[in-house]
Amino acid sequence: MHDILSELTWRGLINQTTDERMADWLMEKPRTLYVGFDPTADSLHVGHLLALMTLRRFQQAGHRPIALVGGATGMIGDPSGKSEERKLLSEETLRANVEGMARQMKRFLDFDRGEISALLVNNYDWMGKFSYLGFLRDVGKHFPVNVMLAKDSVRSRLERTDSGLSYTEFSYMLLQAYDFVQLYDAHGCELQAGGSDQWGNITAGIDLARRLRSVQLYGLTIPLLTKSDGTKMGKTESGAVWLAADKTSPYQFYQYWINLEDADVDKCLRFFTDLGREDIESLVVRHMADPGRREAQRRLADELTRLVHGAEGLSTAQRATEVFFGAEIHELSDSQLREIFADVPSKALPRDRLSGNGLSLIDALVEAGLAKSKGEARRTITQGGAYVNNRRVAIVETNLGPSDLASETVLVLRSGKKNYALLRFE
């Protein structure tokens, strides 16, 4: 075992702890900890990465991680850090969300590691057995309302004039607190980790365990994931950056990290990779000396894409990135090409334009808008500036047929170094 708290501290992953002696306590023997994830969607997103990596680091340090998926708490909605009440999801939707998130967690945690094998639990398995009266008698009576009202997550909502707090969300704290007690009873879990907005819920669980079981449990919080300008990380113009390939492709995921601002890359290397301190510090020094190479962003993108999407997903993302910067195009699908060239002009033509003698390269450049006239297209070709699927074509008389397609229906044309256009033959 190594000093996990020191590891988390230099990585900037400790926000608060409930006990200043926690470092020594963690070094005494392997401990069991948990982090909860509410299933608000059928995929995890970049915002979940800090919590997942925290569980992963604890397991690497010799402790046992539990990932709790909130099949029950997801029905209520956590008011922490929210300005308004969440929409309630159906049981069927919640079940599908739980299954989707559970599959992704297995990429981060080792579920076959002896005594410190990770566990995946669903709090609906125990909360679903409670009656309303039973929960009030067994759990609710141990929560002083004045203490609940003093929690930041509750007080901040009550102080707002544009939205209040329903009894449903107010009761969320009780459910999460009982989760901690249940995991202590069933698995000897003594530590809960979560985002900094979870402090009130975590301490409520510690208080409940002391009242119900006369035991001392512990908690720690990690920072919320924000960019250097204070805005949330993991958001794009099109929405969240998901860990599911069908929501955010490996290429799009890779590009998010490649395009990360210089001010955020050091933090993200420490937060999200397994690279050691010396490797990260050396990488950052080289990056600062020559930011244009984006060496730090590329290493971050490589490490994270491999972790989330596997070696095959990383290879696809790297190949797609190379294509955008001029590598010859082969073995890519229509959907991949449309992702890579999402922002370039695209035009649909009848498939039969490729039949017979095919479509002349001159006409293709005009149709794609890369040349205003046939004369301009001819000059582009003779001057060596015409490319088909990133292969230079210098013969003016070239005709294009089905065999020239880059994928099932797409032809990629380029004029000069950066002027791309797609022709789609449907």
Image (cartoon, helix red, strand yellow):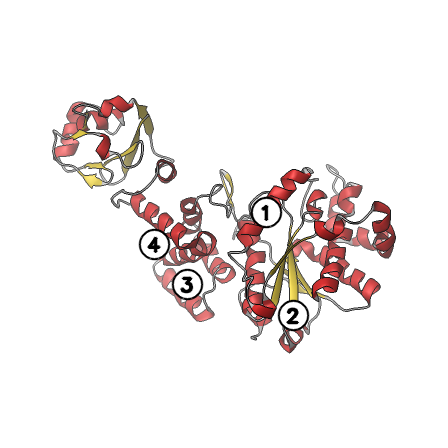
Q: Is residue 122 left or right of residue 227?
A: right
Q: Are marks 2 and 3 in contact (CB under 8 Å)?
A: no
Using a 10 Å C-alpha cutoff, classify the residue at mark 4 as few (fewer than 14 neighbours), some (14 to 19) or many (20 or more).
few
- Lower position in the chain sequence, tag 4 or tag 1: 1
CA–CA distance between discs 4 and 2?
44 Å
CA–CA distance between discs 1 and 3?
38 Å
Using a 10 Å C-alpha cutoff, classify the residue at mark 1 as few (fewer than 14 neighbours), some (14 to 19) or many (20 or more).
some
Q: Residue at x 37, y 35 (%)?
A: 343
Mark 2 element type: loop
Q: Is residue 249 left or right of residue 337?
A: right
Image coordinates of residue 210 in percent, x first then y, are 81, 65
- Lower position in the chain sequence, tag 2 or tag 3: 2
Instruction: Identify the image quadrant of the N terminus.
Output: bottom right
Task: Between label 4 and label 1, give the one nearer the viewer.
Answer: 1
In which image quadrant can residue 67 be found? Answer: bottom right
Viewer-nearest residue: 225 or 125: 125
Q: Which mark is residue 99?
A: 1
Image coordinates of residue 102 in percent, x first then y, are 58, 51
- The residue tagged 3 is 284
Mark 4 element type: helix
**Amino acid type shown at disc 3:** Val
**Amino acid type shown at disc 4:** Gly
- The residue tagged 4 is 292
Q: Are marks 4 and 2 in contact (CB under 8 Å)?
A: no
In this rendering, does residue 226 appear at all?
A: no
Q: Residue at x 39, y 64 (%)?
A: 283
- Lower position in the chain sequence, tag 4 or tag 2: 2
Q: Are marks 1 and 3 in contact (CB under 8 Å)?
A: no
Task: Between label 1 and label 3, give the one nearer the viewer.
Answer: 1
**Number of residue marks:** 4
- The residue tagged 2 is 31
